[in-house]
Amino acid sequence: MIYSKTITELKWEDIIDFCNQQIVEGATLDYKQDFPNDLSKTIAAFANTMGGIILIGVAENAENKPLLPINGIPFERGLSERVMNVILSNITPPVIPEIQICLNKDKSKLVIVIRVPQSNQTPHAINNNTRVYIRTGNRNKYEELISVDKLQWILNNRNKSLLLIEELLSKSNERFQKYFEKELNNQKAEGKNDLKDLSRLSLVLSPVFPSNIICTPPELKKILENIYVFDYFYTSSEFPIDRGRGTSVSYQSGITLGLFVENYAYYTDLSCFGIYFYKQNLFKKFYDKSDLQNNIIRVNEVFARMDQFFDSANLFYQQLGFYGLIKFDFLIDGLDKYILQVGQDHYLSTMEANVGYNITCLSSELEIKKREFISSAIKNLGWTYNVNIKDDYLESIKTK
């Protein structure tokens, strides 16, 4: 899918396959037969609205579908630089899209793929910072010059998206807590020990500005089948961790799945808005030389969970066909009653109750930036215990 495949892996054949689907040009897709004079307007409009893809070298028919066969445009050098020059010379503030040149077999023709993310720096203006456009679904007028009222609409929509994320994550946390308490009560009814003062690891990836449902809960269940990865920490055979395939539960705008084992809760919540939420308890009893019982947080477990989470999330966004800005949030709470284990070494509990880290990137960058994000999150964890966790230790942790 050209919306989610790594941009450098896109080939001429991918363009042909996509155009054969006869997808109508619309709010997030634009076909251009040749290099257009108004390219800056289209790029800025995409960035101001939902993001989108421009295919230069693909003509369209009267139904706004790709005209087959795809001819492309004649090969010439420096086309990527030409696109960037258009942006830097005409758009304020500049938009940085992904650009790929897809050559045909004999390298005589090509299609330029320009993938524009929804921007967190909107509004982007053109014509010496005097005109702001948005992308619409109107086939007769794809770019609309906005008024002051429309500009306020863009800003209000951004605020509404932030409130929507806050509400969705709050509900995901509530569902986790209900799941944990239900399973814990079942154990207590069986005469098993109660458990208190748990530290919890939370990992979340979400579109920066969600607004519309991307898919339905039944579609999410089908997507789930294709996003399992190997759990090399061996809590289960696969990640996301659950009781077995086919045990997910639907709710109004998503699905949940999980596993509860010996006071550990492993919980995943996939939202129809494109949010991947994972949460688990961090609990391990450690007996020191004085026979004092302490809780520990194992760095190798945190590393493994993040590593598997990113691999699974990368597949999730590919299956959704989602392309755009996403935000990663890392949080561990309850640190002040825990010892940190790094390899064979143990570090006394910290005065900090929580540690967090967050960063924004394109969904297509998850795979290549995974190690950087994991390293940064774990180093933040180490610093709360006054320990510098080095990259060579992280590289030594078993990965697939």
Image: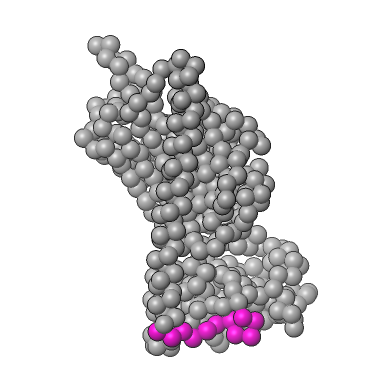
The quadrant of the rendering that contains the C terminus is top right
Query: Can you give x and y, in whole percent of width and height, for residue 103 in the image?
Result: 67, 69
Front in this rendered view, residue 220 or 310 = 220
At 63% across and 35% down in the image, what residue appears?
247
At 70% across and 79% down in the image, what residue appears?
64
Q: Of helix, strand and loop, which mostly describes the magenta segment?
A: loop
At 41% across and 82% down in the image, what residue appears?
149
Quarter of the rendering containing residue 354? top left
Query: Can you give x and y, in whole percent of width and height, for residue 222 in the image?
Result: 67, 47
Q: Is residue 18 left or right of residue 261?
A: right
Query: Can you give x and y, in whole percent of width and height, for residue 70 in the image?
Result: 74, 74
| Residue 135 belongs to magenta span | no
- Residue 91 seen by the camera: no
| Residue at the left extreme of this rendering | 351
Write down the region rendered in magenta.
138-148
The quadrant of the rendering that contains the N terminus is bottom right
How many marks do you count on the picture?
0
At 36% across and 43% down in the image, what residue appears?
331
Q: Is residue 183 left or right of residue 162?
A: right
| Residue 142 belongs to magenta span | yes
- Residue 3 seen by the camera: yes
